[in-house]
Amino acid sequence: MSHGIARAFVALGGYGYNSIVIKSILILVLLLALAAGAFMTRPSQADFQNYMHQQNSGNGQLSLKGLWNDYELENYLKSVTFHDRVLWVTVEKDGQRQYTGAFGHWFKSSSAAVPAAKPS
């Protein structure tokens, strides 16, 4: 009798489990882990401000050009809108996406118009 049950399990695709179901569950678990990682590491508005200050910092010397760049940057930061998309963050200005933040990084959009530090 036990040989007949074993043959039935083998005929159903294995030893009591379906490999397609196991693969699907594994893919779902990995997808949930990826989504949890994106949710926990999405950058904040303060992270964007720090990022922009680092990108705009010149040679570290105090100058009128540096003060003007800081003034432009602060005006830019006041004019952008942050949208939290649960797994990522978008930064928009005048309805156009400027930056996208995901996994602790900022990605510049092709339409981004940001005041940049000019080499001295």
Image (cartoon, rainbow, N blue to C red):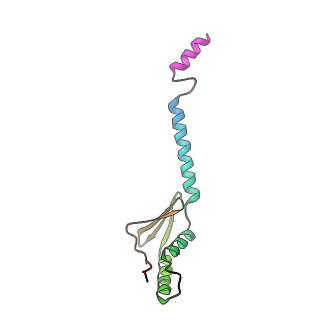
Q: Quadrant of the N terminus?
A: top right
Residue drawn 40% across the image and 74% down it = 113
Nearer to the camera, 21 or 118 = 118
Residue drawn 41% across the image and 73% down it = 94
Residue drawn 53% across the image and 87% down it = 62
Q: Is residue 93 above or below residue 9?
A: below
Q: Quadrant of residue 16?
A: top right
Q: Quadrant of the C terminus?
A: bottom left
| 95 in magenta | no
Q: Is residue 30 above or below residue 22?
A: below
| 6 in magenta | yes
Q: Is residue 31 above or below residue 6?
A: below
* Horizontal arrangement in the rendering, residue 6 relative to residue 56 (left or right): right
Residue 92 position, x and y percent, is 45, 69
* Horizontal arrangement in the rendering, residue 81 relative to residue 113 (left or right): right
Q: Count every numbered label the image shows and give the total.
A: 0
Which residues are drawn in magenta? 1-17
Which residue is at the far top? Answer: 1
Residue 75 position, x and y percent, is 48, 81
Nearer to the camera, 83 or 39 = 39
Which residue is at the far left? Answer: 111
Q: Is residue 97 above or below residue 79?
A: above
Residue 72 position, x and y percent, is 46, 82
Which residue is at the far right? Answer: 2
Nearer to the camera, 120 or 9 = 120
